[in-house]
Amino acid sequence: MTEVEERLHAALSRHALERTATGYRLVHPGAGTASLEIRPVPGAGDTPEATATAIVDVVADYESAGLPSLHAAGIARLNALAVHGAYERHDGRLRQRAQFTLYAVESTADLAARLILEAFGAQLPIGRSVAQSIVSATALEQHRAHHAMPKDWSTPLDEPALRSTVEAMEQRGLASACRGNAVWAELPLHGDCPTRAIDPTAQTALLEVHAGVLHPIAGAGYLASISLPFGARPTDPAEVCRRLNAAEFELVDFVPRLGAWGMQGTQDLPGYHCFLPCPNPYGGMHSALMWWCAQRAAWIRDRYWDAAGAIVFDRAPAGAPA
C-alpha cells in the first residue's frame, strides 16, 4: 500500500461512509452519490519501469431532478466551469469524474492525498451547484451565497514564487513569463518557433496558471488552462472535448485528471481548464499545475496534434513504427 493510500484510509475511516470492496461511498439523498475507488494497476511492480501502482477514481453520479437537460455541447460548455473533474453523460444521467495515479515512490504524498480528499468531499455539492447555476443569474447568485466560499486571498502569492516557476519552465526549453498573479509558458506543437510573440501563427500550446482568481461558485483558488492553436474550428468541438476527456481516463501513468477539456471562448474551441479551490496560497501549487499542463500539452502533441493545426484521433503516435 502506498503512502497516499494509507493517508486516505486514515482520513476516511473516521467518517460515517459506506465501505465498498475497493473504496468508499456516500449517498446524498435527492442529490446523488459520491464514491472513491482505489484500483490496483495490473502488473504493478513486475518491472522497475512499472512505477504506477494504483488509480484513484473520484466520481459523483447526480440525480437528474433539479438539473438542466444538457446535450453534448452543453456538457462541453459546462466543463469550462468544472471543479474537481470532468462532466459526462453516464447511463442517461450526469456524472463527474476525477482521477489520480498513485506511485510506489511518491514525492508529493501530502499534496496528492489533499487533492483526492478535497475532490471526494466537494465534488458532488459544488459540481451540482455549478450545473444548476448555468440556468440563470439568479440561480448563480443563490448557489454562490449558499457555499459562501472565500472570495480572495488575505496573503497574495509573491512574485519570487512565480519567478521560480518561470525559471523552471525556461530550464526545460519553454518560453515563459509572469506578471501579477499569473505565469504562462508555451510548448511547441509543430515547427521550430518557440513562441507566438515571435510568430503569431506559431503552433504552440499556451499554458497559463492564475493564482488567487475567483470561480463563480467555488471561490478563490488556482486556475490552470491550455489553449491550442487550431488552424480552423473543429467540425464538432463538443465531441473533441468528450474524446479527450475519455482518453485521459484510459491512461495509467499520467498527471492528475482534476480538470476537463471543454468548449471555451466565443468560438467554442476545445481547451483545457482546471480550477482548484484554495483559500490561501499552497506552497508550490502553481508550479505543479504548470508542470501538469506542460505534460498534458506534450501528450496532445505526441498523440493527436496534426501539422495543419488540428486534433486527429486516428493519427499514429509520435515514434510509432511506419
Image (tube, rainbow, N blue to C red):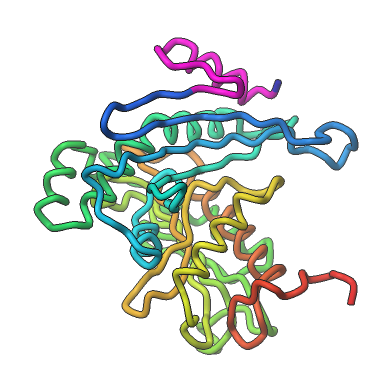
Is residue 204 located in the magenta-colored stretch of the structure?
A: no
Which quadrant of the rendered structure holds the C terminus?
bottom right
Percent coordinates x, y for residue 290 in the rendering = 54, 55
Which quadrant of the rendered structure holds the N terminus?
top right
Which of these two is toward me, 184 or 162? 184
Query: Magenta segment range?
Result: 2-24
Q: Residue at x 23, y 39 (%)?
A: 150
- Side of 243 relative to 2 (left or right): left
Q: Residue at x 56, y 58 (%)?
A: 293
- Side of 37 relative to 141 (left or right): right
Q: Does 234 sit above or below residue 110?
A: below
Q: Residue at x 31, y 37 (%)?
A: 279
- Side of 226 relative to 72 (left or right): right
- Judge whether residue 161 can be spotted in this image: no
Q: Does 100 sit above or below residue 74?
A: above
Q: Residue at x 49, y 87 (%)?
A: 232
Which of these two is toward me, 172 or 43? 43
- Side of 223 relative to 163 (left or right): left
Is residue 16 located in the magenta-colored stretch of the structure?
A: yes
Percent coordinates x, y for residue 42 in the rendering = 78, 36
